[in-house]
Image: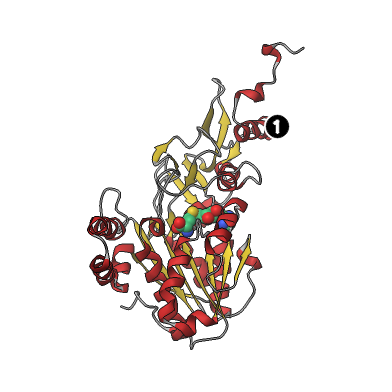
Amino acid sequence: MIATHDRPMTDLFPPLETEIRRRITIAGPMPVMHYMTLCLTHPTLGYYVTNDPFGATGDFTTAPEISQMFGELIGLWAGSVWRQMGSPQPILLVELGPGRGSMMQDALRAAHVMPEFRAALSVHFVEVSPLLEKRQREFLGGLGVPFTWHTSIDDVPDGPAIILANEFFDSLPVHQAVMCADGWHERVIKIDENDKLRFSIARDPIPLFEQLLPRGMRPQIGEIFEWRADQTALELGRRVKRAEGAALVIDYGHAKSAPGETLQAVGKHQYVDPLVSPGLVDLTAHVDFQALAEAAESMGARAYGPIDQGEFLRRLGIEPRAIALKNTAPPSKVMEIDRALARLTGSGGRNMGQLFKAIGFGHPKLGPLPGFEP
Ligand code: SAH
């Protein structure tokens, strides 16, 4: 029989934390990027692999979960972009990170007003989470449109495409580096003397890191710079160019690259310490729209925006849509529609209108995309 005090230490921590501690013990402090990757997409213990994070009982909510208006307007946006592209048949409607599938469901319903577009489209979801994929399959069956699932944008077939991504890029892992007197050091996570996970910095500076920084940036000692691997943005730009298509990315973040730490953890609608409960809470970081645009443009796409989400949705007609919905809604729902409109387009507090931004990418021959006209 094994006495209690002989039980392995690993039992003290939840499974993903045990795995992270094991790796740190073997390989040394873990870069923030690896930590975030494991927390979100570890194949069996990652947050997105084991959780349905949305809704009131979940950890956070997103624009499509707040109101049907969001997905409907995006659906109409895609339909008018399709016309701008010359109405190619077939057209791939690709969504990166569809979550519960609500945005696509609302988009496809709205697309009934453009039957030729709806008939020409096939939906391609890029989803890493088997759990969310299952939910999407259940939720979106029987809509009369072909659906295909992929785990990476690289696997989506070539051809004319419109790519959508709402709150997807913020969930891709970030690297962090800290400026020190002798240069930039990668930010890492170690186990401290009290046996807690703690932020630290790698011993040696990253060679030539300054050359990667956006021109003109004057960071101070102690400041943090975050960046993401470019693959997805490059692939998005490549597809937009090759297929003479377009893309729409909506997310929270900053229009210009700048130093600053934005890594955050959210569980049950509250901010929590990112190093407590790895794998059990959502981890995200702001999107650097300048870096995203530069990567996609380097592949031949043209970027439009970013503009504030509130402005973008107003230009697409969210206000008349809210009025139309209220006209047919029972009195109990009218206030809900007003609240949703304020949340999606307003600024300050929990409102998303200013914090979130929309950026469009198109083949240069298309000209400005709807909502991004000068
Ligand atoms: N767009 C949805 C969900 C946003 S949450 C909404 O607005 O409600 C992020 C989504 O991206 C989830 O579906 C998550 O499982 C997926 N995701 C996160 N990282 C991913 C990755 N590396 N590859 C593919 N999908 C990913």
In this view, the residue in front, 57 or 290, is: 57
Specify the quadrant that holds the N terminus: top right
Indicate the position of residue 181 as horizontal and vertical percent values: 47, 39
Direction from residue 348 to residue 57 in the image, left or right:
right
- Residue visible at 59% across and 57% down? 133
- For numbered disc 1, what is the local secondary structure? helix
The image quarter containing residue 24 is top right
Ligand 1 under 8 Å from disc 1 Cβ? no
Residue closest to the eye, 336 or 155: 336
- Say above or below: 17 vs 347: above
Residue 6 figure quarter = top right
Farthest-out residue, front: 330
Q: Quadrant of the C terminus?
A: bottom left
Count of marks, rendered view: 1
Estimate the x, y position of residue 218 in percent, counting from the top left: 39, 51
Residue found 60% across the figure and 52% down from its top: 129
The 10 Å Cα crowd at callout 1, few under 14, some 14 to 19, many 20 or more, is few
Residue 14 higher or lower than 65, as above or below = above
- Return the residue found at the far bottom: 86
Instruction: Using the rendered image of the protein, determine whether residue 316 is visible from the camera's viewpoint.
Output: yes
When the figure is inspected, residue 141 is found, relative to residue 117, above or below; the finding is above
Indicate the amino acid at tag 1. Answer: Ile
The location of residue 175, given as percent across then percent down, is: 53, 48
Question: In front: 304, or 163?
Answer: 163
Q: Residue at x 65, y 43 (%)?
A: 44
How far across and how far down the image is residue 285, in percent?
45, 49
- Residue most toward the right? 1
According to the picture, the residue beneath numbered tag 1 turns out to be 26
Is residue 236 depicted above or below 51 in this figure? below
Front-most of 161 and 124?
124
Q: Residue at x 43, y 52 (%)?
A: 286
Q: Is residue 299 visible?
A: no
